[in-house]
Image: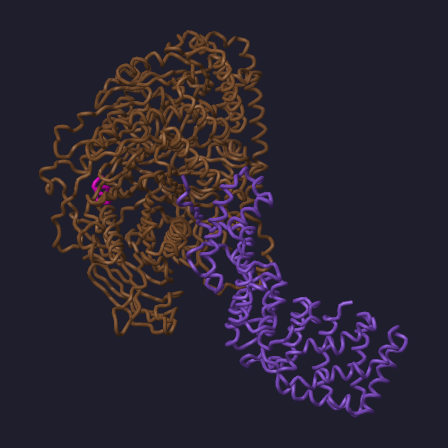
Amino acid sequence: MSVELDVFVGNTTIMDEEVYQLWLDGYTVNDAVKARVDAGVLDECEATEDVLLSDTMDQYRTFQMCERLLQSPAKLANQLLFQITPHRQAMLIERYYAFDDPFVREVLGKKLSKGTKKDLDDISAKTGVTLKSCRRQFDNFKRVFKVVEELKGPLVENIRQHFLLSDKLARDYAAIVFFANNRFETGKKKLQYLTFQDFAFCAGQLINNWTVGAVDNMVEDMDVDLDKEFLQELKELKILITDKDLLDQHKSLVCTALRGKTKALPEMEANFKNLSRGLVNIATKLTNTKDVRDFFIDLVEKFIEPCRSDRWTSADLKLYLTHYTNSAHILDTFKHQAVWDRYMGVIKSCIFKMYHD
Amino acid sequence: MPGKLKAKIVAGRHLPVMDRASDLTDAFVEVKFGNTTFKTDVYPKSLNPQWNSEWFKFEVDDEDLQDEPLQITVLDHDTYSANDAIGKVYIDIDPLLCTEAASVISGWFPIYDTIHGIRGEINVLVKVELFNDLNRFRQSSCGVKFFCTTSIPRGYRAAMVHGFVEELVVNEDPEYQWIDRIRTPRASNEARQRLISLMSGELQRKIGLKVLEMGGNAVVGYLQCFDLEGESGLVVRAIGTACTLDKISSGSFSNTHTHPNTAPPSNACNSPSKDGKESPLAHGCRSTHNSPVHSACSSQRLSQNFSVSVPTLIFTGMGSGGSAGKEAGPLKTLLRQQTQTALEQREFPFFTLTSFPPAFLVHVGGVVSARSVKLLDRIHNPALGNTRSYKLLDWNSVTADEPETRDAWWEEIRQEIKSHAKALGCHAVIGYSENTSICEEVCILSASGTAAILNPRYMREGCLDMGSTDHRFDDPSPPSCGFCHIPYDELNMPFPAQLTYCYNCRRQKVPDVLFTTIDLPTEAAVTGKGCLIQARLCRLKKRAQGEVNATAISNLLPFMEYELHTQLMNKLKLRSMNALFGLHIQISVGENMLLGLASATGVYLTALPAPGGIQVAGKTPSELNEQHVLTIQKRINDTIAKNKELYQITPPELTEEGVGSPIPEPRHRSRLFRSHSESSDEVSELDLSHGKKDAFVLEIDDTDAVEDIHSLLTDASPPTGFYSCNTETMPGIYNWTTAVQMFTSVRVLRLSNANLSNQSLNKIFTDLCENLLKSFYFKLRSMIPCCLCHLNFNVAVPEEELIQVSVTAVAMTFDKDQAQERPAERFITKGGSETEDQLQFSLELCADTSSTNSQTSSKISGVQENALVSSRAASVDYGSFADRCSTWLELLRLKAHTIRRGSVKTSRRTQSLAHSVSSLEHCSPLTEGRSRSLRSSRSFGGSSVTMVKMTPLSFLPGTRIIKYLGIINMFFIRETTSLREEGGVSGFLHSFIAEVFAMVRAHVAALGGNAVVSYSMKDCVLMENPNKNQAQCLINVSGDAVVCVRETDPEPVAQMVNSGQTCAADGTS
């Protein structure tokens, strides 16, 4: 005796959020049943495990049928097959496009290609995220990437409109797309301590200030590619470290301003030249794609690590960078104020974000 | 040539990719009606084509308009090879033919392919211009309204109820034509879909003609069925109740919502009273089985005809029931004479309605049913070559050597039903339905209904003005119990029954148990809540062919019916209830077994006596046995006590007896029969004595009985917060919220081990049904407190060793805090009259008690072999009077209290309605507050889909139906040759059912509606062959498309009705 067929279809599609999450997380039906038993669902309604199994299978089938629609969320709103209330649709989409931070950390900055996809089982093993879930997340990244690649207009807004995502999630996706496009290196050991949210914040800064879109908002790829002209102009900043007078003047201005405000002043004074060289060198090398990729590792190596070894506090860091940036304006021979601000604005906020006490 | 049909193809969306190279599609559309076809231009390389075509105009007869669907085919243009079909849409334009229904069909329809399912959507506009037709001999019946709803539709009043209409049409099944061997499955499926669509159109037109002939303008309770007889053909048949309906002007019925069954105030009174029935075991359930009739030799016809009435065999055969009621009291006689004139003109005084206008139903006799086993024969179709692609067969002329026709078969059965009703002293049958079960060449035809006496007022011409002339026929009994009073003469009862004076009015006699097929009349006085009661039974039979097989089946039928009734009776007693409503017994035939499933809603009618308990007795006294008996007895008593509490059954009468000892007084026990009725004569004799006895004894000596007890006790009661019933609403629950969730569930079980016994089979079947219910409770747990209403079970044996159960029902939530609100509300609306009634009642009760006592004590306890009988002696002492009176005082005080509370609650109620906007959200299992915040910032691209609610009930709680848009009657076939890839049979059926829902919703939305009421899935026939990776499924659904607005809303603006996309159901906003 066996159940040959067992279906339950509601006029309003019945979806249990917990089961949906289990499905998204790549649980098999049997594992999902176990998880639900553990969660105590059985006590809720005098149910037996058979009932739970049947219910789980039904829901899994429903989700599988919905998956095609979830991949182009706009369709979900005007399809006729499933009757789902609008805010429930929003929940389905939001959860479908949600991702696991450990997973995204692994993929961030990598090319969203077949090659990477092949490595997903390693990533799965490493992160503990099921392979099925890894695939879904990876395919989501890729799908979003492909769609926005060809669109004009602001990146975040495009993602939001095409995939009907919340603002927060759309920003995260923008970061993922931006990283994938510029292939920023994020996997190095020195960068391991950084979370996805750290990077997402930096990506937001870069998108808003350094891309073409920051100056012209009707260009293709405007938010994905860095502004080439700006990168060229950055070379001009070299004067800050090559001109000995300028460097000394800059140093004394900063130190004067900092006097009495921090305990780390001696270290700051000692390291000033090194740190300044580090930051300006990063700026001048950004015309090379290779160096763009190493942007974050450079920031860590050239700036964050030295500060950390000197035990600067975040407040110290903030103070230092603020004065470092502002003092450059007082240097009478320094003519590149605009570029300097555009550069340092981003660097400053990135470093704040990346500097963990 | 009185009609012009116009269609416009606007656009398509989400089309499938038909050209792999470009990942695009070059789509165009063919629009076909009758033999005329138009085409749109090809819209190249797009998955979202914008055809924006001209208006295609078809000039056609209105006859064709009724029969034919508009057929829209979407194709992919291919320069070099044949164009590929993407899919089709069939649009039934019937709703446009009725001035009161929809005026335009406009909206997105799923493009459906029988192999691939839904493939994108198409936006279509359809209009009809009808010219006046003065031809009196016309063949069309445009303008006759059809309703699936089995009560007078809201917003209408019945000026006259004309009665039964039926029709059937027959054709060869395309699936079995020779051409099917060479055409593709798709072509074959489409031929079938189209044929059935044509046949139902024609059927509807013909029924409409009959209605016009009778002078009516509508068919209510329209029930259409398909019999797929395989080789022998395809039968589409329909029954309904012809009525003359008047539309009530909108203002006057604003109050109707307070009670689902309530008719408009202008209709003189508000609730239909109906229902009567008989106890299954002891009273009035009559059913007949005809032996197989071999079509070739008509001499054998009915030779084995025997009627079993289940426990109480009233062995009357056809027409023998005439004597009953002859000596009825003067009033009854008068009534009967009156109605007879009205009803006798009709061949069959049958009504498919289950709810009636107030005062329409006078008394209820009991359930009448008839079954007949037939052998199917091939239909020869001489009609090939006719100009039409199909042709109805006239059976009589075609098969000259076989005088049998499907019509004659049904006629026979209906005659039988009629005579059963007569035997019960009734002149009408209400809640009438017919169905079939077919296995290979054997077909069981079944019909059942409830014998009743109706008020003739509605059936005579021009007498609805509530003329004063009719008052003398008005039944003097109060509406809350009048229908329970026996229609037959107590001195000359058609079957033995135990009569007592009505516990409500004390004036008339009532039976101790009542079974009916109708809904609980709204006015009926009910104690506590009701619940779903099911009897389930499997019987093995030998595999056989032809007549032998048919005989074997018809021999089994009476026993099955008997067993089912026994089970029902036991389960009813176990729940301490005394009446069943909505009784539906289905017997399904398979190769090697018969399945029987009886479903009903049990209630405690205040007017009927309290049911006795169940007493267990051992036949052979022995120490061991004694112990066993005691244990079982205790379990039964415990269960009864538990159920009383669960269903809040605390009738005042019971208080003095029930308190103290959980074990019911012996005198309240009645006997459960386990006698095996070998000969009907014998049994009928036994039953005479049974009528006088009042112990209900369960013997546990034979193994069957042990089984019975087990099955009795294994039925789990629903989890806390859940109720279930198979009627329109649950007695005792009145404060529904607007959250509804209609669902369909199908389960198929494969019996793997070949040598199952009847008992283990029963167990399997019972578990299957119980598990289904458990699944529903679990899935819908987020809706608690909730009631599953209209639980409609359908069993089938699709193949050897397979058992299929399909269920359609609706879950509705209610407001727990206000569960007791209804009585109060009633008091308020009806003024003090009700309270007075109660007062009067209580006084009478006191006065009558002595007579009751003397009466009961004078009864001689029934004598049945070894029944443990204790006389229902004078144990009712006079001391209990005081108790009784004080209880009543208590009750009155309580009532007064509720009235006060009620007024407060009403205001709260409106408040809860205001919140109903988000009610639909309740349908999903978990809270979603979390995503709420996301919502505001999001736009869904403008064209969001209209929410369409569906329900098998005739109403949606918290809403008012403002317009009926026409009947939805759709038939779909789905086939697959890649079963595994579609997720196996479950995946296949799951998506098919979802697609069917989607297509129903789309049609309703296109008509401008936002809900389907009286929805039902008539057929779900699944065939599978996993080895070949194939499956096929046929589904037939029907319902009434309506526009409804929230109760609190003002009258809608006119434009809302016609704009399909704008009238959003509540819940979307």
Q: In this view, does B615 lie to the left or right of B494?
A: right
- Say if B908 sits above or below A115 in the image: above
Q: Is residue A218 left or right of residue B221?
A: right
Q: Camera-side residue: B838 or A99?
A: A99
Tell me which corner region of the image, top left, top right, bottom left or bottom right, holds residue A344: bottom right
- Location of the N terminus of chain A (image quadrant): top left
Number of numbered callouts drawn: 0
Q: Camera-side residue: B634 or B30?
A: B634
Q: Is residue B909 left or right of residue B163?
A: right
Tell me which corner region of the image, top left, top right, bottom left or bottom right, holds residue A170: bottom right
Please tell me which residue is depicted at 18% across the width and 51% down the height of the picture: B177
Q: How is the image coloured?
A: by chain
Tell me which corner region of the image, top left, top right, bottom left or bottom right, holds residue B954: top left
Main SS type for the magenta part? helix
Please tell me which residue is depicted at 47% across the width and 9% down the height of the picture: B850
Residue A255 horizontal/vertical position (percent): 86, 81
Q: Camera-side residue: B702 or B642?
A: B702
Is residue B272 shown to the viewer in this render? no
- Location of the C terminus of chain A (image quadrant): bottom right
Magenta segment includes B46: no
Is residue A315 shown to the viewer in this render? yes
**Magenta stretch, residue numbers:** B207-214
Q: Camera-side residue: B504 or A141?
A: A141
Please tell me which residue is depicted at 25% across the width and 64% down the height of the picture: B57
Q: In this view, does B394 lie to the left or right of B540?
A: left
Residue B667 horizontal/vertical position (percent): 46, 12
The chain drawn in purple is A
Residue A100 horizontal/vertical position (percent): 61, 61
The chain drawn in brown is B
Residue B482 horizontal/vertical position (percent): 39, 24
